[in-house]
Image (spheres, rainbow, N blue to C red):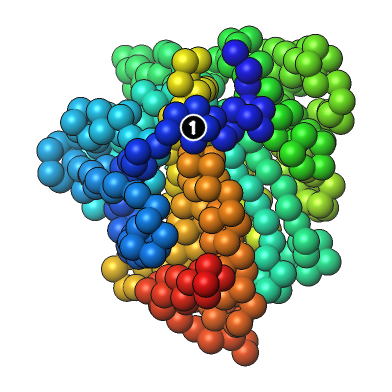
Amino acid sequence: MGLFTDEDLTNNAKGKVMASRKVFLLPGDGIGPEATAEVTKIINWMNEALGSGFEVEEGLVGGTAYDAHGEAISDGDMEKALAADAVLFGAVGGPKWDDVPYEARPEAGLLRLRKDMELFANLRPAICYPALADSSSLRKDVVEGLDILIVRELTGGVYFGEPKTITDLGNGQKRAVDTQVYDTFEIERIAGVAFEMARTRDNRVCSMEKRNVMKSGVLWNEVVSATHKDKYSDVELDHMLADAGGMQLVRWPKQFDVIVTDNLFGDMLSDVAAMLTGSLGMLPSASLGAPDPVTGARKAMYEPVHGSAPDIAGQGIANPIAMIASFAMMLRYSFNMVAEADQVEKAIANVLDTGKRTGDIWSEGCEKITTAEMGDAILAELQSLAA
Ligand code: IPM
Ligand code: MN
């Protein structure tokens, strides 16, 4: 079975005739519902004007699911997620659920989706839109034109490794254990994704681990190198220790093309990368499984990298761009609607060029607008691009 060739990435649409496009929407908590509402506007318009045939069903995840049925995602919604062509996910979490049992905490819903759908490959592109080069906390020349892709392993490592416990030692002390564990095949398949993605870009991969202190880092390094030698020697490969990688990401981010790393380092490094682009509100992501060997269809979930931002939830001021850009990734990777995906991304860039900004990316001289106004502006731009 191939990994992520270009062919694979579009197989969902090629491999079968899509009678309909089943999207399962999980708005979640905090700003999740506000942000996903802006995507719903676009989907409705695409259905009406372009006959795109999206069938959208909505479910509960996170704290809102806990409030409704005492768990972070119900078995019923989990089944719907598994049956959908793609899942669009908002955000989960918030102080309201600080005291719920660990197993039922909002994040558990997200982690179960990733694990049960076997979404091992998390693609987090960090692109600095020209109009936002001034919004970054870094100097303009450091981030202008930035276009990197973080490929984060998503179903392994310390997030899921067992044992994962807190034990009472009986002497007034407790001991907490998390387990960082990777098998060869997990490293091989995520490295394959990174190399395949690199071939569609600048053909360079930088692998990050901590082989100087972690056995999992030693194996990671070894397997990435072997996979490279075996199948991808046309791609340029570098290795960096993850701490140095974090430093380089802030020092001169444009040196990178594709970064491949484990679940935990990927979590941290992608937040850093997000901030380079001006705001956490800008970064989309795609979480993909392996293609089905028979149908070519792959499970997929799309979510913004930002969280639920409970401090600004319900005020209508959140930035919906990461959510809308996640929808563009859905069009591209789940439905092979490449032209439409390009247009959504172009619409975002064009609206930013007009100086319209939500609060998080606002700067002097720009027009401050609400979540809904940003969604409307992007939709209007999309309509004129499609006309
Ligand atoms: C992310 C988030 C999640 C993670 C949380 C909400 C569990 O931070 O998607 O980056 O740690 O993976
Ligand atoms: Mn994170």
Q: Residue at x 46, y 75 (%)?
A: 380
Q: Position of residue 215 (x, y in %)?
A: 67, 13
Point out residue 192 in the picture as x, y percentages from the top left corner.
68, 23
Residue 2: where, in percent of width, then height? 63, 18
Q: Position of residue 138 (x, y in %)?
A: 74, 64
* Camera-side residue of 304 and 56: 56
Is 51 situated left or right of 366 in this image? Answer: left
Quadrant in the picture for the N terminus: top right
Residue 200, picture quadrant? top right
Instruction: Say which residue appears at 38% left-offset and 46% top-offset.
Output: 88
Is 353 drawn above or below residue 365 in the view shown? above
Image quadrant assignment for residue 318: bottom left
250 relative to 315, above or below: above
* Residue on which the image places disc 1: 12
Within 10 Å of disc 1 (Cα), the crowding (few <14, some 14-19, many 20+) is: many
Location of residue 311 (image quadrant): bottom left
Query: Which element is circle 1 on?
Result: helix
Camera-side residue: 23 or 239?
Answer: 23
The residue located at (36%, 23%) in the rendering is 116
| Residue 260 appearing in the image | no
> Is the residue marked 1 within 8 Å of ligand 1, measured from its CB?
no
| Residue 356 against residue 193 in the figure, above or below | below
